[in-house]
């Protein structure tokens, strides 16, 4: 059954399409550890995940010039890409949901604060580049997450209505961004707990994309 116009599914990438958070923590610790910042998964989920590269550089590298901040963050992202290359695995149930959405004619958009090189590497690594109508990069906009602009751009890219769409996020900043754009937001429990995701504004939280409650929500929103 084809869904009506104005509907869309919008996905964060890291921790949502693929569980990459542990590799991000490893890369951050390699680069930031010598600078006095060491992260475990809990601290990373609170202070790193979902934030834009620019905001992380400003927070953790305040004494560096803008040029050095950019170079240090580029080093971290290059290390992450090296660590993740060939190891990208989809979150449980993702491929089934994407195939269902494809058959229903629902456009899908990736919305991330990650650099474009990372985003394209991960989506290509999952073999799903052709399923996404657009990839919205927070650092390429005037504002990244938690501002609503990235998700508003995602809706605009496929001419979708916020009230007819569903977003998927694993971070506090991502949930804030999607929710502020007026989109029903599902929290993916890859790093944060149900309570933490719900407190950030998630309408529903799941551990996998084939959760029955999630399928009910999507069916109701998509008009399936």
Image: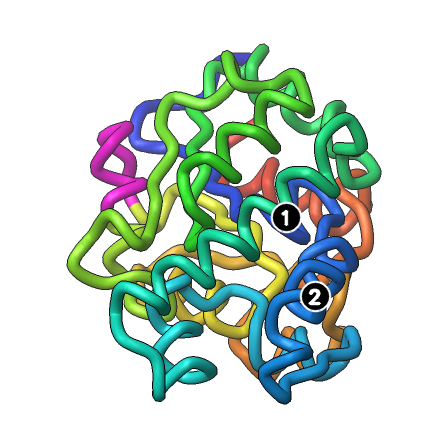
User: Where does the image place residue 68, in percent across and percent down from the top left?
Assistant: 34, 67
Front-lying residue, 59 or 34: 34
Q: Position of residue 59 (x, y in %)?
A: 41, 84
**Residue 158 belongs to the span the image colors magenta:** yes
Q: Are marks 2 and 1 in contact (CB under 8 Å)?
A: yes
Q: Give the SS element for disc 2.
A: helix
The correct choice, above or below, for 117 with respect to 125 in the image is below
Q: What element carries label 1?
A: helix
- Residue 79 is marked as 1
Residue labelled with disc 2: 30
User: Does residue 188 appear to the left or right of 51 in the view shown?
Assistant: right
Which residue sits at x=34%, y=79%?
A: 64
- Label 1 environment density (alpha carbons within 10 Å; few <14, some 14–19, many ≥20): some
The residue that appears at 62% across and 40% down in the rendered structure is 81
Q: Is residue 189 left or right of residue 34?
A: right
Picture coordinates of residue 19, whole percent (x, y):
75, 48
Question: Foreground residue, 151 or 212?
Answer: 151
Residues in magenta, as a range: 153-161
Say if 128 sits above or below 108 in the image.
above
Q: Residue at x 38, y 33 (%)?
A: 135
């Amino acid at each position: 059954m084809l869904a009506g116009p104005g509907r869309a599914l919008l996905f964060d990438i890291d921790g949502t399409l693929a569980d990459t958070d542990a590799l991000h923590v490893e890369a951050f610790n390699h680069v930031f550890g010598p600078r006095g910042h060491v992260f475990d998964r809990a601290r990373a989920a609170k202070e790193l995940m979902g934030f834009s590269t620019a905001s992380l550089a400003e927070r953790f590298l305040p004494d560096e010039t803008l040029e050095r901040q950019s170079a240090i963050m580029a080093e971290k992202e290059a290390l992450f890409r090296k660590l993740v290359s060939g190891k990208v695995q989809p979150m449980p149930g993702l491929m089934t949901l994407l195939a269902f959405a494809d058959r229903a004619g629902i456009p899908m958009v990736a919305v991330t604060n990650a650099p474009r090189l990372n985003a394209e590497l991960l989506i290509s690594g999952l073999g799903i580049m052709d399923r996404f109508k657009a990839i919205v990069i927070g650092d390429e906009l005037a504002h990244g997450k938690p501002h609503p602009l990235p998700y508003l751009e995602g809706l605009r890219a496929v001419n979708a209505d916020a009230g007819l769409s569903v977003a998927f996020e694993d971070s506090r900043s991502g949930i804030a961004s999607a929710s502020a754009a007026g989109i029903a937001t599902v929290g993916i429990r890859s790093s944060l707990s149900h309570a933490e995701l719900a407190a950030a504004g998630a309408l529903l939280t799941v551990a996998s994309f084939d959760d029955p409650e999630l399928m009910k929500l999507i069916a109701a929103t998509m008009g399936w």
